[in-house]
Amino acid sequence: MNTETKTIVLAVAAALLAGCASGSGSSGVTVTDSRGNTRQLSEEQGVACLLVFFLCPLIAADSAGAAAAQLPATDRDIFGPAAHFMTWTDLKRDTRTRAPGLGLVHSYGADADGVIRYVVDPSPSSTIHFAFDASGKAVYLEDSSGGGFAGHTGTLAALGQPGIDRVAGLANSPFDGATNGALVANPYALGWNYQSFGAWNGYADGNGAIRANSFGIPTPASAVPTSGTATFTGKSAGYYISPTGHGAVSAAELTVNANFSARSLGFATSGTTIAHDIKAPTAAPHLNLSGTFTYSAGTNAFAGTVTNAGGTMSGRSEGRFYGPAAQELGGVLSLRSSTTVEAFTGAYGAKR
C-alpha cells in the first residue's frame, strides 16, 4: 500500500470511526460495550464500524516502522467483550482474547538524543488481551492499562528466534526499530498450548515504559507435582538498556530444571543476542541469566533472584506453572545495575 493510498484509507477510516462514535442517524443496530453502555447505530454506521475494525490492523501490518493503528478502547469495546482464553488449540483466530497473567512495568526517561538517563523501579501489571490471525501470527497485544499495539511486522529471526513475533514498531527511539511495539512468543511455532509471553516498549516525548507479561491458564495448585524432576525448555525475550543508556531488543534460549520434591527451579538462559535495529544481532553472553526459584507447598507460583553472567545486574523473577498438570511454565523478570542505568526487563515461557 503506497503512502497516498494509506492517507486516503486512514482519512476514510477516521471519518467512519467518527460516525461510529456519534451514534446518530436512523435506527439500525444497537450495540452494547463491555461496560454495559448501549448505542444506537444506523445500518451504515454498523458497516462503518466493521470496516474500521478490519482496516486498522491491515494498515498497521502494512506499516512496519509507522505508528500502530488501533481503535480507542471505548470504540473497540462496541464489538463486545474479549473472549476468555482456554488453550492455543481452542483459540478462535482474529478475535481479541483475554487471559489472566502476571507482569511488570519498567519506566525510564531519555534525553533529546534518545539516550536513556534514568530507570524507575518496576511496578506490577496483569491481564493481557491479544489476537492471532488465521495463519497463526500475533497481530494484537494489550495490557490492563489499555495501551496496545496492532499489526504483525515480522519475527526475531534475525536474532535466531523466528518463534518470537513482532507486533507494530517505530524507529528513532532508544530502542531503534522496536519502540511502541511488542515481542510476542508464538505458541504455534514453539509447540506450546497453555501459555505464552509478551514484552513491549512504549515511548513518546522522552518518556518510555517497558512492559513484560506472562499469561495463560495457571495450573491448579493441587495439580502441581509433589515429587520427581522435569526439564522445561523454551525462550526468553525483552528489552535491554546498556550502561551508556542505549536500548536493544534481546532474546535467548531457556532451560529450567525443576525439582518438585524440593519445590525448587534452576533457571538459566543461554545464547543471548541483542540487536539495536532488529537486523544485526550481536552475541551478548554477559546477558545470559541464571537464578534459583522456589515455591511453597500447595501453590502454583514461584519466585527468586536472577543475576546476569556479567555480574553487573541483579533482580527478581516471578512465574507460575501452566496447564492442567504443570506441563508448561512462564514468568517475568527485571534486573538493574546498582551503579548505572543498565537494566533488562523481559518475560519467558517453556514446556517439558
Image (cartoon, rainbow, N blue to C red):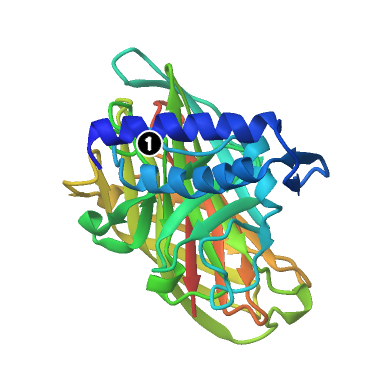
Q: In the image, residue 243 lies at what x, y percent? A: 32, 29
Q: In the image, residue 116 lies at what x, y percent? A: 37, 23
| Residue drawn 49% across the image and 76% down it | 351
Q: Is residue 10 left or right of residue 260?
A: left
- Depth check: 243 or 194 in front? 194
Q: Quadrant of residue 227?
A: bottom right
Quick one: which residue is furthest to the left in this view? 280
| Residue drawn 44% across the image and 49% down it | 307
Q: Secondary structure at mark 1?
A: helix
| Residue drawn 44% across the image and 46% down it | 55
Quick one: which residue is furthest to the right in this view? 36
The residue labelled by disc 1 is 9
- Depth check: 346 or 180 in front? 180
Q: Residues within 10 Å of mark 1 (few under 14, many from 20)?
A: some
**Amino acid tagged 1:** Val
Q: Quadrant of residue 69?
A: top left
Quick one: which residue is furthest to the front in this view? 26
Q: In the image, residue 45 lies at what x, y percent? A: 62, 40
Q: Is residue 50 left or right of residue 65?
A: right
Measured along the vertical axis of the image, is residue 338 above or below residue 192?
above
Q: Is residue 125 left or right of residue 270?
A: right
Quick one: which residue is furthest to the bottom in this view? 228
Measured along the vertical axis of the image, is residue 98 above or below residue 53?
below
Let me know if residue 17 appears in the view: yes
Q: In the image, residue 204 lies at what x, y percent? A: 44, 22
